[in-house]
Image (tube, helix red, strand yellow):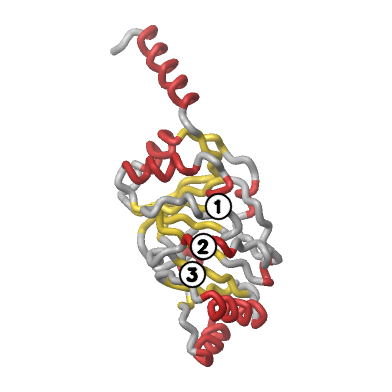
Amino acid sequence: GLPLFAILVIEIRRTQKEKMEKHLNVTEIFYSLQGESTYSGYPCIFIRLSECNLRCSYCDTQYAFGKGKSMAISSILEQIKKYPCSLTEITGEPLFQEDIDALFEALHNAKYDILLETNGSISINNVPNYVIKIVDVKTPGSGMENSFLLANLQFLNTQDELKFVITDKVDYKFALSFIKQHNPSVKAIHFSPVSEVLNASELSKWMLEDGVKAKLTLQLHKIIGLE
């Protein structure tokens, strides 16, 4: 094997390279089935970044509000290589971190398909076209209803998706009104009930009555017991 001195030199160079690289704060990286969006049911590698600028009432990932672990972009790619999958989703609130572009570029160069889940309150203007955007429009039940940047609608295209998380009839009416007013040009619009407070069958009835041009979306990963 290599002498100890050579091993130390290699390790020092690797550490120096990592320090020069761009880093992101990461809460977790895991492999599961995609639970929401039109990609629901597909195996997917999730890169959950840390911190968020919103505090939604029904948030189920509050553990990601902290600083997380600082990871070099190359370390993130090294970790996801372990999984037999080319679909990735960057979640948390990825656009809250200034070096997110470096991750987009690295994943794209490594031939990954990229989904970006974002809360709609930060501009998506600079997100590359090869990234599929899944954008939340926060409803009144979230407590963050005024957070959506209307300018983001002009940066959506026909591969992107919008999601409304629904807690009650007020949220539902809000979503209907938003769609009617703005007529977003996207691949799909999702109505996702917060299962603890709104029965999916109830939301289904409302959608059928109104013939909504939107899709009922359930959190598949929770239904089958995956996280």
- Percent across and percent down for residue 154 are 49, 63
Farthest residue, direction right: 143
Q: Nearer the viewer, mark 2 or mark 3?
A: 2
Q: Which residue corresponds to mark 2?
A: 135
Left or right: where does residue 216 sit relative to residue 50? left
Q: Which mark is residue 92?
A: 1
Please tell me whether mark 2 sits on a helix, a strand or a loop: strand
Question: What residue is drawn where x is 53% and y is 61%?
Answer: 152
**Up-down: is 19 above or below 224?**
above
The secondary structure type at the circle numbered 1 is: loop
Label located before the other in sequence (3 or 1): 1
The x, y position of residue 31, in whole percent, is 41, 51
Residue 85 versus residue 20 in the image, above or below = below
* Crowd band around label 2 with a 10 angstrom C-alpha radius: few (<14), some (14–19), many (20+): many
Check disc 1: other Cα within 10 Å, few if <14, some if 14-19, many if 20+. Answer: many
Horizontal placement of 196 versus 48: left or right? right
Disc with the residue nearer the chain's start (2 vs 1): 1
Q: Give residue 223's mark.
A: 3
Mark carried by residue 226: none
